[in-house]
Amino acid sequence: VQLVESGGGLVQAGGSLRLSCGASGRTFSHYAMGWFRQAPGKKREFVAGITWTGGNTYYADSAKGRFTISRDIANYTLFLQMNHLKPEDTAVYYCAADPLEEVVAIRDPIFDYWGQGTQVTVSS
């Protein structure tokens, strides 16, 4: 499995970014897919997750109402639309995949496969 993130960058507070994750190497049927982030000196934390087949979504409290996770099944791409960004959203964002879709509900970084990460910086 290969996961390649893109779309990070520098944005002012209140702005928006859309992260993408191109997935390859599997059909991803019944996989769990997720976005995590890690700020300097902090643990990697769950942001949002989705079941690839059913499209069930899960969000961290910090992401609810501002971020939207989605996937394009035909093009094997995962997205994270981030609106109303805050300086505390600054982190490296990682795409993750796991063959057990139940994993997404746990909201822990126990996924089997990870991308290399993309930097998101929100200035105040």
Image (tube, rainbow, N blue to C red):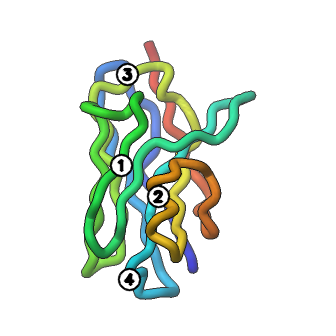
Which residue is under mark 1? 58
- Label ID, residue 104: 2
The front one of 121 and 48 is 48
On screen, residue 99 versus residue 124, left or right, reads right
Q: Name the spot of residue 28 as percent of width and height, x first.
A: 42, 80
- Label ID, residue 102: none
Q: CA distance from mark 3 to mark 4?
A: 37 Å
Label 1 sits on what residue type? Tyr
Label 2 sits on what residue type? Val
- Label ID, residue 12: 3
Label 4 sits on what residue type? Ser
Q: CA distance from mark 2 to mark 4?
A: 14 Å
Characterize the local packing of mark 3: few (<14), some (14-19) or many (20 or more) Cα atoms within 10 angstroms.
some
Query: Which residue does the image show at 27% across and 45% down from the upper left?
Result: 68
Is the Cβ of the residue at disc 2 closer than 8 Å to that at disc 1?
A: yes
Q: Callout 2: helix, strand or loop?
A: helix
Q: Callout 4: helix, strand or loop?
A: loop
Which residue is under mark 4? 29
The front one of 4 and 112 is 112
